[in-house]
Amino acid sequence: MGVGEESLNNVSNVPGLVFAIFQCMFAAITPALAIGSAAERGRIFPSIIFIFIWSTIVYDPIACWTWNVNGWSNLLGGLDFAGGTPVHISSGTAALAYCLILGKRTGHGTDEFKPHNIANVVLGTVLLWFGWFGFNGGSATDSTTRAAMACTVTNLAAAVGGLTWCLMDYRLEKKLSALSFCSGAVAGLVAITPGSGFVGTPASVAFGFFAGILCNLAVKLKHIFDFDDALDVFAVHGVGGIVGNLLTGIFAQKSIAALDGQVINGGWLDGHWIQLGYQAADSVTGASYSFVVTYLILFIMDKIPGLSLRADPEAEAKGLDETELGELAYYHVDRLVAVNTRTGETKTVKEETIHQQNDTNATIV
């Protein structure tokens, strides 16, 4: 309401309506990240209700205190260019609450859950990497040198994060895993998000390096504390967001912000030591608020008839694609073929269509 062609607060060349739709992208992707931890056992309809409630009473207040000119973190001096706390820390800790409320997938800890499709992982990472230029660079709200710098440090942090994670896994498996590189690239993108408009290219190497190491190690937390975060949302986004916020307190520079006229005190590189404290305060508050309120939302929802969060065991075993959506990604054909060894002639003895299931590996004979 009341948003049109005029520039936002008369401080940007971008029309208010364009900026509003740009912010809708942040508001839409954040809860989508949060529900990733519920994969393979969380019901779809309750998650839709959750997204509306969560966006309203968790995301909106955090975004307001971070970016609104009257928000407490903004007034305190916290620096968050493109969503370290509102997007990544909030979604990561919400994902942790979600998986704790839901419980572990059937077979978790005994069965081996492998990535569904590595090609899709690579494609998704490519799309995210490209989209992140709009995510971070677009937060400059103008075509300025600062926007170009935000895109440059975003790309570099992602590349370094991917290589770092990949090499960390190489020391264990002696394999250069594409999945490892993709995980590290996303961790680097997450970490550089809050600092993308405040740090230079040398600093972005440190963002990618530390995000790759610390987020990789954070993945081990689900084994130590025995929770089932299916997509490692807490490890990559929650921990990555905290890493990025704190490093912004160290590497933020007045000169980078001044590329489009913003005046800041900078971080440790500029001798502004308290900035790290501001960043820590924002990170802890965002993580605590998101986790506690998310847990309460889910706890209450799960007690309401019709809004139970978890699919029943039969639906979970059959697969939520079929039971919740009525659509399958794949159909497997199990065919038994007899071969005449003298003539080489083949004959189909038995053929059966097997629907995709979570606990079944169908093979073609």
Image (cartoon, helix red, strand yellow):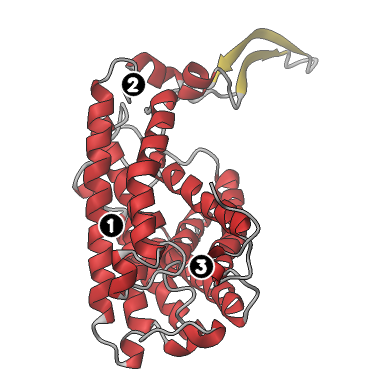
Question: Which numbered disc, 2 or 1, marks the residue that appears first in the sequence?
Answer: 1
**Viewer-nearest residue: 174 or 23:** 23
- The residue shown at (38%, 83%) is 251
**Viewer-nearest residue: 301 or 119:** 301
Q: Which mark is residue 187?
A: none
Q: How crowded is mark 3: few (under 14 residues within 10 Å), some or many (20 or more)?
A: many
Task: Write down the residue under mark 1.
Answer: 286
**Viewer-nearest residue: 301 or 208:** 301
Horizontal side of residue 132 vs 60, given as left or right: right
Q: Estimate the x, y position of residue 355 in percent, counting from the top left.
A: 55, 17
Q: Which residue lies furthest to the front in this view?
A: 2
Q: Can residue 236 be seen in this view?
A: no
Judged from the image, the secondary structure of the residue bearing numbered disc 1 is helix
Q: Estimate the x, y position of residue 8 in percent, counting from the top left.
A: 55, 64
- The residue shown at (62%, 56%) is 18
Q: Residues within 10 Å of mark 2 (few under 14, many from 20)?
A: some
- Name which residue type carries label 3: Ala
Which quadrant would residue 294 be assigned to in this image? Answer: top left
- Name which residue type carries label 1: Gly
- How far apart marks 2 and 3 lie (CA) works out to 38 Å
Judged from the image, the secondary structure of the residue bearing numbered disc 3 is helix
Which quadrant would residue 335 be assigned to in this image? Answer: top right
- The residue shown at (63%, 70%) is 13
Horizontal side of residue 257 vs 305, given as left or right: right
Judged from the image, the secondary structure of the residue bearing numbered disc 2 is loop
Task: Write down the residue under mark 2.
Answer: 307
- How far apart marks 2 and 1 lie (CA) works out to 27 Å
Disc 3 + disc 1, Cβ < 8 Å:
no
Task: Write down the residue under mark 3.
Answer: 158
Which quadrant would residue 235 be assigned to in this image? Answer: bottom left
- How far apart marks 3 and 1 lie (CA) works out to 24 Å
